[in-house]
Image: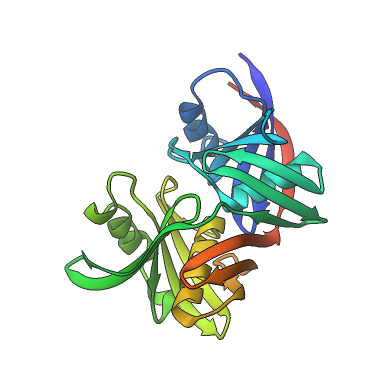
C-alpha cells in the first residue's frame, strides 16, 4: 500500500483534488478513482501540479471520467491560490495562463479565444436550433434560452456534446439566459464530467464573450453560475476579436488529507 497527500479545493462550486508532483501510475485511472463521489474523495476533476522551466507551475487537468482536458478556468484559479504567490504563471496544454491572487479572489488570464462561429444550425432531439461556438482553451457551444430553470441540462447537453458537428473532440455546452445589460445566467454541461456542474470557468468566459459579440459590448460581463456565485469576465474587443480576457471569482482550500492506493 502507498499513499500521497492531496488538497481538496473549490472555485465557485467547481471542486478539484489537487496533487503536487505527479504520483506514479496511470493518471487517468487515478482521476476516475479519486473523483468518484461514493468510493473516492469526490470532485469534478483532478489537478496535477508539477515544476516547470517555462512557468511557475505546470497544471495538468483530468476530468472525472479520466480524460485529460487542455485547460480549466476554475481549476487554474485553484492552482494559482495553491501556489501561494500573488502573481503566478501556469503552463497548461492550452498555453501559459497568468494569475493574480488577492485574498480568496483569484483572476486568471485565459488564452486568446479562437474558432468563433455564430448561429450554427444543428438538429437536436428532432428540433432545429441555432448555437454558437468558441474555444476558450477548451471547446464550448453556447445556447441562448428563455426559462433556464426548466432546461434539461443533462439530457439536451449530452445530445449537443456528442453531436456529429463537434466530433471528434466533442464540446462543453453552456445554456445562457440574459438577465441584464451586462449580466447573464449560465448552466453548463461539462465534457469529461458528463453532467451539469455548479460552475465552469472557461464556459463562463465563453458565454460572456459570445454575449458581448451579439450585443456589441466591451469591458465586462457578469456571469451568474448555478452555485449562485457571480463570476466576472473582463475583456477587450475589436470587432470579432477578443484579447486580454480575465476570469475572476472566489477560490478556497476545503481540506487536506492522505489517500491510500
Q: Which residue is more in the foreground, 196 or 235?
A: 235
Left or right: 222 with respect to 103? left
Q: Does residue 2 appear anywhere in the picture?
A: yes
**Where in the figure is residue 57, as x and y percent of width and height?**
69, 35
At horizontal 83% and vertical 56% (from top left) the residue drawn is: 103
Residue lying at the far front in this picture: please name it. Answer: 238
Assign the N terminus to one quadrant of the image: top right
At horizontal 61% and vertical 47% (from top left) the residue drawn is: 75
Q: Does residue 224 appear anywhere in the picture?
A: no
**Where in the figure is residue 69, as x and y percent of width and height?**
48, 41
Left or right: 175 with respect to 111? left
Residue lying at the far top in this picture: please name it. Answer: 1
**Where in the figure is residue 213, as x and y percent of width and height?**
47, 74
Is 20 drawn above or below residue 209 in the view shown? above
Total labels drawn? 0
Q: Which residue is more in the foreground, 237 or 260?
A: 237
Residue 255 falls in image quadrant: top right
Assign the C terminus to one quadrant of the image: top right
Residue lying at the far left in this picture: please name it. Answer: 126
**Where in the figure is residue 72, as x and y percent of width and height?**
55, 48
Colour scheme employed for the rendering of this structure: rainbow
At horizontal 49% and vertical 42% (from top left) the residue drawn is: 70
Amino acid at each position: 500500500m502507498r499513499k500521497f497527500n492531496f488538497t481538496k479545493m473549490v472555485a465557485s462550486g467547481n471542486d478539484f483534488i489537487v496533487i503536487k508532483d505527479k504520483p506514479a501510475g496511470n493518471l487517468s485511472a487515478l482521476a476516475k478513482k479519486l473523483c468518484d463521489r461514493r468510493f473516492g474523495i469526490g470532485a469534478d476533476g483532478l489537478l496535477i501540479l508539477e515544476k516547470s522551466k517555462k512557468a511557475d507551475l505546470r497544471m495538468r487537468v483530468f476530468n472525472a471520467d479520466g480524460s485529460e482536458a487542455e485547460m480549466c478556468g476554475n481549476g487554474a484559479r485553484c492552482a494559482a491560490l495553491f501556489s501561494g504567490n500573488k502573481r503566478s504563471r501556469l503552463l497548461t496544454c492550452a498555453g501559459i495562463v497568468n494569475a493574480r491572487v488577492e485574498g480568496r479572489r483569484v483572476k486568471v488570464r485565459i488564452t486568446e479565444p479562437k474558432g468563433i462561429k455564430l448561429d450554427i444550425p444543428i438538429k437536436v432531439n428532432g428540433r432545429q436550433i441555432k448555437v454558437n461556438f468558441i474555444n476558450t482553451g477548451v471547446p464550448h457551444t453556447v445556447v441562448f434560452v428563455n426559462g433556464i430553470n426548466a432546461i434539461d441540462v443533462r439530457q439536451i447537453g449530452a445530445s449537443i456534446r456528442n453531436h456529429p458537428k463537434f466530433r471528434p473532440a466533442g464540446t462543453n455546452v453552456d445554456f445562457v439566459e440574459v438577465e441584464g445589460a451586462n449580466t447573464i445566467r449560465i448552466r453548463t454541461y461539462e465534457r469529461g464530467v458528463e453532467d451539469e456542474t455548479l460552475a465552469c470557468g472557461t464556459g463562463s468566459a465563453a458565454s460572456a464573450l459570445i454575449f458581448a459579440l451579439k450585443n456589441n459590448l466591451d469591458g465586462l460581463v457578469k456571469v451568474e453560475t448555478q452555485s449562485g456565485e457571480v463570476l466576472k469576465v473582463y475583456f477587450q474587443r475589436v470587432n470579432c476579436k477578443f484579447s486580454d480576457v480575465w476570469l475572476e471569482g472566489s477560490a478556497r482550500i476545503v481540506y487536506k488529507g492522505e489517500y491510500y492506493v
